[in-house]
Amino acid sequence: MVEVLGFDDDPRRIIGVSLSVGEGCTDFVYRYVAIPRVTATWIDSSDLERRGIGLVVYAENRVEEVLPATPSRRAIRVESDLADRVEQLEERLNRVEEALQGALAKMEELAKEVPREAPPPPPQQAPPQPTPPMDWAIRMERALGEVLESLRKLSSRVDALASAQPPPPPTQRAEEVKAPPSTSDLPSFLRDNPWVEILSKRGRGDER
Amino acid sequence: MSEEYKRKYTFGEDYGTSDYKYGPITKGEVPKVVENRGYFPDKSALMQRVMGEAKDVVVGRDIPLYLEAREDLSTRLVYPMRNGIVEKDDERSWRVVKELTLYGLREFAVSAYDFNGFFVVASLSAIAPRYMYEKIFDIHREIDEETRLVRAVTIIPQPLAVAIAHKIPTCVVLESGHGNTQVCPISRYPIRNAIVALNRGGSDANTLMAEILKDAGYGDLAQEEALVRRVKEAVGLVPRDLDRAIEVAKSEPHRFRAKYRVPGTRIEIDLAEYSWARFLVGEYVFNPNHEIFQSFFVRGMPRPRDVKIGDVYFHGMLDFGEAIVSSVERCPIELQPHLYQHVLLSGGNFQWSLPPQLSDVAVDSATKIKMLLREKGIENVKVEMAKEPRYSVWRGCIVYGYAAPANYEWNWERMEGWVHFRKK
């Protein structure tokens, strides 16, 4: 919503319009007033601040945000909803990953069971044939392909949502945090370390 | 709180006597290292005012930028853990510990949207009294209130961390640092009742090295502790048998001649006819009871004394072999043979050079320990040096944080578990 005022407008009108920006409107994220630097001296910025309205001042070629606006409740709610959705999607992603791992394990088992070259069936014993294990494996492979495809889609949606998240507060000299370590990425002192199992049982009351 | 989160945000802290090693699991094999010290600048000094913000205490890599007159260093530069223990009321030392902890955590502050504080595993000397545990918990709690960087914290003894990093569940860890030595048997847990502490560490060997330098005509250089330590590390040797080593060294002075040139200077130290004394330094660390050391004690060199700090009794003159036996014999008999199967040596006080041409009379630390145990009738012992001992405690902390369940609550009887500062 934009309202344009002229330079020669009555100062009282400019102040009135500035303080009532976005009034009655619920579908906004931020409200700003942009006025020339000379006009800005008429406005008490604390009145704007109380109303959550931001102030942008311009003069010749310079534009400056002198008072940041407060996001609307709706915007805050949207951000919070977004975070919830990301969390839900992450959970779903985890479940799909688990299912995928299970399917892969089953595939491997199956591959071991299937003979490399099955002997041809005798010609006279034609009907009714049970589904050979190889067919089942092919169907599984197709299903796996579909799961992988949906996993990729889900993953890209999560990435898109995560990138739409508001930036986190700045931290002092923050170092980049890498992705969580998967088993293969673990440092050498963690790999095949019997203490991992010993320590993971702490607190169960079955040791010591 | 999921295990996955805890594994992603595990943070290790090793409060060593000389260095503070710290960093999250994502650091990989090697942590960050800064000296475990803090500097209290003169806030009224002109330079401090010129530099703007006058800090109460400076830690980390910025310390050299703040150092002032050399004579002030002894009072303004504080090494809080020099002996592994910080006195309860030593406010300056605790201030340094807090500042260092904050420094390390801030360096790795995470901006990821799911970050809600680290699971911190701190490591202290095995003989640290209970008040030190309480103080470390308080420090982390205060830091979390200020920064939200610590979600939960736990503390483990350094020898346990060493055993974890070396993947050995049952062993004896001998940790010898600057000020003291700890013998700690471990069988899935540290056996706290069997810990033996010695009031002897690298600093005592430095004291003896300074006396040897005085005898060799370098009394002026003997005042500089850092230099004495470097000479000790360069020329000190561990004898297979002290009497025999001295005899051979005296008969072949050229082969055993100890010379050291201080890097970047014109100073060269030559022990010349005193070069046989290089064996004294190594022997003194492992066993100070040889009669030859009496002459140094008589001349005023302080003898390592038996002392009691808090509830812990520190032996002064116990040799390392006797200390191991005495510790193991406090454990159940069935366990004892398993403990002797793995004796793990850790700490800078076991880092001795062994020139191949002198191996007829000099040995490494592991061999020396085996020999001392053999004298006590203990055979078939496996002794090994910790690999990369500088980092092993931090690595043990990371494994502990990675594996110990997040819902394993701290218990003062077990001295294990997590202290949670907040649930969300």
Image: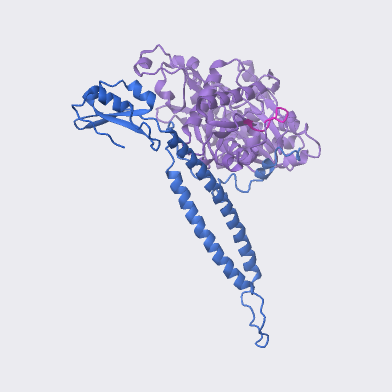
- The one of A206 and B257 positioned closer to us in this rendering: A206
Residue A130 higher or lower than A182, as above or below: below
Residue B245 as seen in the image, left or right of residue A93: right
How many numbered dots are placed on residues in this image? 0
Coordinates of residue B376 in the picture (x, y in percent): 76, 34
Residue A116 picture quarter: bottom right
- The one of B5 and A53 positioned closer to us in this rendering: A53
Chain B as rendered: colour: purple
Quadrant where the C terminus of chain A is found in the figure = top right
Residue A51 as seen in the image, left or right of residue B403: left
Q: Residue at the location (49% across, 41% down)?
A: A81
Instruction: Say if residue B318 shows up in the picture.
Output: yes
Coordinates of residue B16 in the picture (x, y in percent): 57, 29
Is A40 part of what is drawn in magenta? Answer: no
Coordinates of residue B95 in the picture (x, y in percent): 53, 19
Quadrant where the N terminus of chain A is found in the figure = top left
Q: Residue at the location (72% across, 36% down)?
A: B373
Q: Main secondary structure of the magenta part?
A: loop
Chain A as rendered: colour: blue
Residue B404 picture quarter: top right
The stretch in magenta equals B410-419
Coordinates of residue A29 in the picture (x, y in percent): 39, 36
Residue B36 as seen in the image, left or right of residue A9: right
